[in-house]
Image: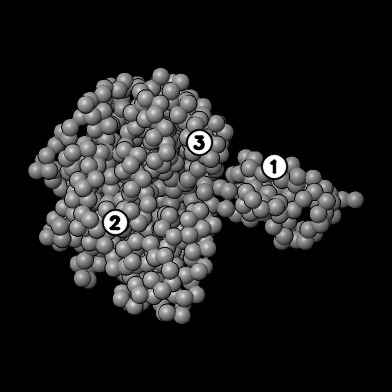
Amino acid sequence: MTRQIKTLFIANRGEIAVRIIRAARELGLKTVQAHSLADADSLAVRLADEAVNIGPPSAAKSYLNVEAVVTAAVASGADAVHPGYGFLAENARFAEAVEAAGLVFVGPTPQQIRMMGDKVSALDAAIRAGVPTVPGSKGRVETPVAAGIVVDRIGFPVMIKASAGGGGRGIRVATSREEFDRLMPQASAEALAAFGDGGLYIEKFIASSRHVEVQVLGDGHDVVHFYERECSLQRRRQKVWEEAPAAMLPADVRAKLCQSAVDLAKAVNYRGVGTIEYLYDDTTRDFYFLEMNTRIQVEHPVTEMITGFDLVREMIRVSMGEKLRMKQSDIAIRGHAIECRINAEDPTKNFMPAPGLIESLVVPGGAGVRFDSLLYQGYTVPPFYDSLLGKLIVWDEDRTAAITRMARALGELKIGGVKTTRGLHRALASDPDVQAARFDTQFLERWLEKHSEGLGE
Amino acid sequence: MATKDLLSPLPGTFYRKSSPDASPYKNEGDSVKKGDVIGLIEVMKSFHEVHADTDGTITAFHADNEDAVMAGQPLATLSI
């Protein structure tokens, strides 16, 4: 069943709201931009056909307020809601409320969001689909005795994770039985306090791994993948620099990895764009399911650059009930793409947030360069939301050329008035280990301890 | 008696307590020592403590819990 939509309500802010407006406009849709009081002069508000105030600056009272957002969407006359990423994008209750109000939710079904949002049910789905998972409890451990049996089987070190957790919160590493016995009750109490659910599960801790993730798109029946991204360069579990494809992945492993992602998405009749995240151990060439994100991701442009498809446009199309417009054989990797997240943070002062007035702006250009941002000269970046100002994305024929092009583009980028992470990226682009793709998910934290100098503008 | 304003070091959201269910760090009339935490500023999803920069007694708060504040805005007045 197809349902043509005419007006898209954008329940997000920042650069992704701008990205969605652009895709919607190319599809001939009218756009209504939701905004808090602090975002009344945002670039997204300026670009959209209409804008509607949904509440005060605090995200809890605006972008995270299900009732306020749904009420505003209905009142605006929109017939679909795009949740972007973050905020309510993976909130099943929000997706249900949008559908109950008679609007299209641009994303998966509430049931799919719910299944993949809970770590244990997501892991169960992965196991049922035959996707490799990290050795562990394969679900909640209900008693200390059951936990002991699991750690005897998989050996130390182990990670103790909160079943309802996310974003790296509630994770502990135990290297011995004594430490494990001490940490388990703490972890359970903390999970209960933080998430209202003290459920825990246990996994083997893999000391050195890379973060790879596969982009999928489904229409509720068929699923295709758009190959993988590598996002190993992270600080405090936040991605900083992303690439596509993963440079160190052998072709046979790539084929198995991408097929496993399709298998999982097909097993749940997935609708929309999704990303299946994996740990990859490049010494053993093993990959393990980490989690599935049921939304568009920040780093989706690197995939667009190497495959030539517009993922945001396609996710809107499938939400209207359209079939996939491409077959797997239509999707190929061409060249290499890199994205650097330009944040309003001072890398010389422990990444202290730096909101404020954008006094001047020079955006890089030229062949293979894309800048997705929320910036314009004279804009004041508010302090209430995350620090992402924009994403500098480059494409070139191969990884070496892409790094050279990124260094060139970073050199052109000038953001006057606020501190940014541009200097960090310039240093990374000239680092021999980064150039050789010799890194794991711990690399950047170690690197920052040695390279605290010279990261300023 | 001299007074001194305690200014917000950062723009963001001001919190007078460590969590929604906690009691406030300090109330009007409380005496404080230099370095005491009197609140938190949330800026771009990271939390920063606001410390008293002198010994004294809080005579007034100028920002409520969850108020949006600018850098340099008075959060409280201390008599010193």
For discs 2 and 3, the disc positioned in front in the rendered view:
2
- Of the residues shown, which amino acid type is indicated by label 2? Asp
The residue that label 2 is drawn on is A124
For discs 3 and 1, the disc positioned in front in the rendered view:
3
Residue shown at 42%/32% (left/top)? Answer: A97
The residue that label 3 is drawn on is A65
- Around disc 2, counting alpha carbons within 10 Å, would you say few (fewer than 14), some (14 to 19), or many (20 or more)? some
Q: Residue B7's spot in the image, x, y percent?
A: 70, 48
On the question of residue B39 being in view, the answer is no
Look at the picture and state if A257 lies above or below A285.
above
Callouts 3 and 1 close, C-beta under 8 Å? no
For the residue pair A363 and B24, the one nearer the viewer reads as B24
> Do discs 3 and 1 share a chain?
no
Look at the picture and state if A312 lies above or below A178.
above
- Of the residues shown, which amino acid type is indicated by label 3? Asn
Please give the chain letter of the residue carrying mark 1: B
Q: Residue A457's spot in the image, x, y percent?
A: 45, 52
Find numbered disc 3 in the image and state the secondary structure of the residue it sits on: loop
Find numbered disc 1 in the image and state the secondary structure of the residue it sits on: loop
For the residue pair A39 and A358, the one nearer the viewer reads as A39
Q: Is residue A355 left or right of A314 when viewed as pictured?
A: right
Could you say which quadrant of the image residue B12 lies in? top right
For discs 2 and 1, the disc positioned in front in the rendered view:
2
Mark 2 → mark 3, Cα distance in angstroms: 31 Å
The residue that label 1 is drawn on is B64
Please give the chain letter of the residue carrying mark 2: A
For the residue pair B74 and A134, the one nearer the viewer reads as A134
